[in-house]
Image: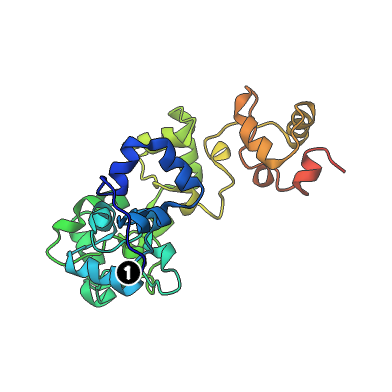
Amino acid sequence: MPEKSKSKYNSLKEWEKDFPVHYRDAKSQGHIEELCESFGWDLPKYLVSFATYEQAQKWCIENNIEDMRGYQKKYKDAIDIKIPREPNNVYKDKWVNWYVFLGKDNLRDFATYDESQKWCANNNIKTYTDYQKKYKDADIRLPSNPHESYKKYWINWYVFLGKDNVKDFATYEQSQKWCIEKGINTQQGYQKKYKDADITLPSNPHESYKDKWLDWSTFLGKKCLTYDEAQKWCIENGIESSKQYYKKYKDINKKLPRHPNRKYKDKWVSWYTFLGKN
């Protein structure tokens, strides 16, 4: 094995500080590994291969990583091994879920679906946000992502939280009327005010009213241009693709729908036809 060269620098990082231009050149030309080998420096982390799935899992268990948030906070602190920011992507061939990766025995570590659902009902948990704020305080062990832990039984948050889905809410028409009367013009405006309503409104009306849902513009009672008017605007403004439409449709005072294919479904053929192309 060739003898390593001597250098007054103890690491690549020290050398980089004095010679940033040479470092950039060496990096761009792929010479960093050769340089480190020559002077006996440790390779920078970005050149070190990731630990195996099993090694990363072992590190998580030894460091008491409890959930994805804990992992994201601490994975950079790993000293002896390099573990990825997104293990679900790097280890996709072996990945099951976060619970398995963190060394938990998946469902058996947590309360059952029925026990978790009962706890939510007893503690007046009404929304996903309520759940995320309070689940760690429970006297039983609850998962941070019940839709993953209970995927065998999962339907949606409304059912999990003991609501009879759409039946618990005002009808589509009642919700739409409330939005119009209160001057709700955007999805963001709805999210800010729906909890203040004197009727029970869903946090995600597009899910609760999916049988009637077209788009937010229709739900909020906005009068959009007709198909022919919208098509004329697209042609006059040189809209060539759906991508261009999504970029520009909000820039005008006229009322164009975000999803014209849904809004004009009775007349819709294709984007090419809508944009005036033959």
131 versus 110 height, above or below: above
Instruction: Decide which of 248, 51 is in the foreground and name it.
Output: 51
Give the structural element (helix, strand or loop) at label 1. helix
Percent across and percent down for residue 157 are 36, 58
On the rendered structure, is 119 left or right of 150?
left
Residue sitting at 11 percent across and 64 percent down?
Answer: 139
Q: Estimate the x, y position of residue 16 in percent, counting from the top left.
A: 34, 41
Give the quarter of the image for residue 107: bottom left
The residue where tag 1 is placed is 149
Kindly identify the amino acid type of the residue bearing the numbered disc 1: Ser
Residue drawn at (24%, 59%) of the image: 78
Vertically, is 254 above or below 107? above
Front residue (pair 72, 159):
72
- Give residue 165's quadrant in the image: bottom left
Residue 230 coordinates in the image, percent (x, y): 73, 32
Task: Count the labels in the image.
Answer: 1
Up/down of 252 relative to 102, above or below: above
Q: Residue furthest right?
A: 278
